[in-house]
Amino acid sequence: MVVCVCNAIREDEVRKAARSGSMSPCQAYRSLGRQAKCGQCVPFAREIIEDERAIA
């Protein structure tokens, strides 16, 4: 599933970034060499990161 249309970031990329230590959408996006643009994706990305952290 696509999380960020502006940057073509997929859910699995955000999950991988979270497992690698990213604590926020901004950190996850930076780890992918990108940054949030319009911001519509940030709440969904945050939810994904929280889910991954709860599993760890």
Image: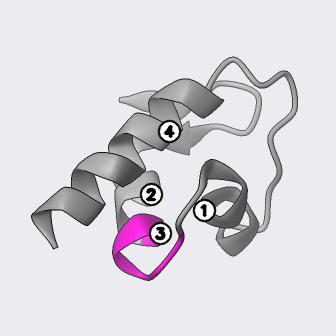
Assess whether residue 1 is covered by the magenta stretch. Answer: no
Kind of residue at disc 4:
Ala
CA distance for labels 2 and 4 = 10 Å
Q: Position of residue 8 (x, y in %)?
A: 63, 37
- Locate residue 31: give its quadrant: bottom right
CA distance for labels 3 and 4 = 11 Å
- Residue shown at 60%/62% (left/top)? 28
Q: Which mark is residue 45?
A: 4
Find disc 1 in the rendering and name its residue. 28
Q: Are marks 2 and 1 in contact (CB under 8 Å)?
A: yes
Q: Are marks 3 and 2 in contact (CB under 8 Å)?
A: yes
Task: Report the front residue among 41 and 46.
Answer: 46
SS class, disc 3: helix
Q: Are marks 1 and 4 in contact (CB under 8 Å)?
A: yes
CA distance for labels 2 and 1 = 8 Å
- In the image, taking residue 35 as reference, residue 8 lies left or right, namely left
Q: Which range of residues does the magenta coloring cover?
A: 17-22
SS class, disc 2: helix
CA distance for labels 1 and 4 = 9 Å
- Locate residue 41: give its quadrant: top right
Q: Is residue 32 above or below residue 15?
A: below
Task: Report the front residue among 55 and 34.
Answer: 55
Q: Which mark is residue 8?
A: none
- In the image, taking residue 34 as reference, residue 5 lies left or right, namely left
Kind of residue at disc 2:
Glu
Kind of residue at disc 3:
Ala
Q: Which mark is residue 17?
A: 3
The 10 Å Cα crowd at callout 3, few under 14, some 14 to 19, many 20 or more, is many
CA distance for labels 1 and 3 = 5 Å
- Residue shown at 24%/48% (left/top)? 51
- In the image, taking residue 47 as reference, residue 44 lies left or right, namely right
Find disc 2 in the rendering and name its residue. 13
